Image (tube, rainbow, N blue to C red):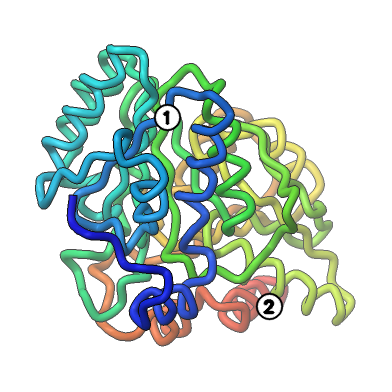
């Protein structure tokens, strides 16, 4: 294990100044370990990017630094799980979902091991790192693997709530999280239940169904549109598999339009999952999928990319406004 950054160092202060929710993963795992849960953690040379340095400092005997060996990390985590511990392993989502797909499918999901896979810096949040590091296919890949739960939380408090809920969850889980810069949607006691959407309202005109970082943008867009006299609702579909089918159909019965918003390719992601429910269950609502339009995302600062792909609040509002017109 490489040496952790000291809390008094300028690097540590700058890192946490930029990413105030970076410590969510480590702090929550420490809480679970101290409560007596058999939590162990590991990463592939990214403990400073995902904040696991805090857990490594508190429980060095429970932490493994695998180096730049993501596939080995996943297989080792599956092996650890057979001994009775509960591994939480984290790396960039682009590496975890794409590079490690074989190991997740065969070693973790097929063998039904309680491994918690944490893909961070999802979507286009790595900005200048470019296509090799952008994760805009991971939802589609992970939700196609049998017996694997897929979760995309909106902010730090909701991620912490999901981690706490995971200790009693029987299946392996893929957690899709951003980069620690997420504006808060929820307070300290964030609502979370696997497979149960958080409903912020169902609109007569449009109900937006969003996940991950798009929830905050969609919430701002909803509030702006409702302030202009429209009837717009929002669902935070944090669990993409299993999807809350009842919530989708409730929106389909009341709303004229369902707009899905995600930091992901519109093929195979949240929009695809909602489309499958509507096709199987029926409903009169029109579905519009908003996200990355089946392309390799551009290279730029994340803020610029969110604006370009209309994933910021103004962008989501403009997309919804065009549908209302």
Q: Residue at x 39, y 79 (%)?
A: 302
Residue 253 is situated, as x and y percent measured from the top left of the image, at 78, 41
| Foreground tag (2 vs 1) | 1
Residue 212 is situated, as x and y percent measured from the top left of the image, at 52, 57
Seen in the image, is 295 located left or right of residue 139?
left
Q: Which residue is drawn at 24% across and 23% down?
A: 78
Which residue is at the front of the view, 216 or 157? 157
Disc 2 element: helix
Q: Quadrant of residue 259?
A: bottom right
Disc 1 designates what residue? 39
Seen in the image, is 16 located left or right of residue 278?
left
Q: Is 68 above or below relative to 311?
A: above
Which residue is at the front of the view, 191 or 9? 9
Q: Quadrant of residue 135?
A: bottom left
Residue 265 at least partly seen: no
Residue 74 is situated, as x and y percent measured from the top left of the image, at 21, 33
């Amino acid at each position: 294990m490489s040496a952790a950054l000291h809390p008094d160092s300028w690097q540590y202060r700058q890192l946490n100044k930029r990413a105030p929710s970076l410590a969510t993963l480590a702090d929550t795992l420490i809480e679970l370990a101290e409560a007596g849960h058999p939590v162990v953690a590991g990463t592939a040379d990214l403990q400073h990017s995902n904040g696991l340095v805090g857990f490594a400092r508190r429980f060095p005997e429970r932490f493994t630094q695998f180096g730049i060996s993501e596939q080995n990390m996943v297989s080792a985590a599956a092996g650890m799980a057979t001994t009775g511990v509960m591994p939480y392993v984290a790396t960039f989502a682009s590496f975890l979902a794409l590079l490690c797909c074989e190991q997740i499918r065969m070693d973790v999901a097929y063998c039904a091991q309680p491994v918690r896979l944490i893909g961070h810096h999802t979507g286009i949040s790595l900005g200048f790192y470019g296509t090799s590091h952008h994760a805009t296919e991971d939802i589609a890949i992970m939700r196609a693997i049998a017996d694997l739960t897929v979760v995309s939380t909106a902010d730090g408090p909701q991620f912490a709530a999901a981690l706490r809920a995971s200790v009693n969850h029987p299946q392996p889980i893929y957690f899709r999280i951003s980069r620690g810069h997420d504006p808060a949607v929820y307070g300290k006691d964030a609502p979370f239940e696997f497979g149960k959407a958080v409903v912020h309202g169902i609109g007569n005109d449009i109900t937006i169904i969003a996940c991950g970082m798009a929830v905050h943008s969609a919430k701002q867009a909803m509030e702006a549109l409702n302030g202009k006299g429209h009837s717009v609702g929002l669902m935070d579909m944090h669990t993409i598999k299993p999807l809350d089918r009842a919530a989708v159909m409730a929106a389909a019965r009341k709303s004229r339009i369902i707009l899905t918003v995600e930091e992901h390719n519109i093929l195979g992601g949240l929009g695809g999952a909602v489309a499958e429910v509507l096709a199987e269950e029926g409903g009169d609502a029109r579905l519009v999928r908003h996200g990355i339009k089946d392309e390799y995302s551009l290279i730029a600062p994340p803020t610029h990319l969110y604006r370009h792909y209309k994933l910021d609040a103004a962008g989501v509002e403009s997309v919804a406004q065009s549908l209302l017109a």
